[in-house]
Amino acid sequence: MKGLDFAEIARLVERKQGTSLEGLATDVVPVAGGWMVFDTPGSPVNKVCGLGFHGVPTDAELDRMITFFTERGAEPKVELCPFVPRALMEGLGKRGFVLQEFENVLIRDLQRTGEIRSLLPWGWPVGVSIEKVDPTNPTLVDDYIRVAFSGFFPEGMELSEGLMDFGRRFAKARGYDLYVARVNGEVVGAAGCESGNDVTLLFGASVKPAFRRRGIQQALMATRLERGRELGSRLAMINSGPGISTERNATRLGFGVAYSRAVLVRPGEGLVKSS
């Protein structure tokens, strides 16, 4: 992105992760320049993010991260960008953290000219309409939550009331915009975005299995990019596992990989894994 190097982009993006959850998750606690985030056992937001831009955390801070999660019955998880000091990785390794997976961070310059929908490779999907979720409509909010979260849990799994409550919170939060895709009136896809400080973060896109490969995820992505541009965001970002459909759809709409993030966990008996 013009005017920013990759380290500056990483600083902006990693900070966005923490600030977007402040006042939304049950516990968001600053630590060593980053944030410890916890909402409910099994929640995908349970993690430490934003570390490494203010030096190496002390031994006491690293130990506090472990205690923060284990006291809540959750497996400690830390996300690291490639610009963190080596000593930070060594400190986590000494405490039993192991690599769980890699995640790519993709970005797009929203100030580029041109109509975003023109990039949809097969045009707008036939028979699909996209609706902005009215946060005062509890039925639609719950429909959004069930579809949006369905892609992160085993098919058919009933969401806990804690996860439903979390979704209802960000449905009403300032800066958040949620969308559902309909086919013949049925909610078949869902996705959200959060905008602030020149960045629009795209998250939580999911499409019901029977309606995949129709371009619905791309249409939801284009809608959220248009929203970010409307709000004046300079940058859009999205997280994706390497090589999956989310990454392919994002690159078709002008995203590029800025860096890869390492996800480390510290397994422990009786601790609930985060999604």
Image (cartoon, grey):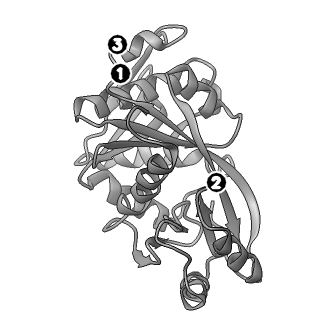
* Quadrant containing the C terminus in the rendered view: bottom right
Reply above or below: 126 against 58: above
Report if the CB atoms under discs 1 and 3 are less than 8 Å apart: yes
Reply above or below: 52 against 205: below
Q: Amino acid at mark 2?
A: Met
* Residue plotted at (31% across, 36% down): 234
> Where is residue 132 shown, x and y percent of the image?
30, 34
Q: Amino acid at mark 1?
A: Arg
Between disc 1 and disc 2, the foreground one is: 1
Report if the CB atoms under discs 2 and 3 are less than 8 Å apart: no
> Where is residue 151 shown, x and y percent of the image?
60, 44
| Residue 204 visible somewhere in the drawing | no
Residue that badge 3 annotates: 114
Which mark, residue 112? 1
- Extreme-bottom residue of the structure: 60
> Where is residue 154 shown, x and y percent of the image?
69, 51
Residue that badge 2 annotates: 157
* Residue plotted at (54% across, 86% down): 61
Q: CA distance from mark 1 to mark 3?
A: 7 Å
Reply above or below: 31 against 9: below
Q: Residues within 10 Å of mark 3 (few under 14, many from 20)?
A: few
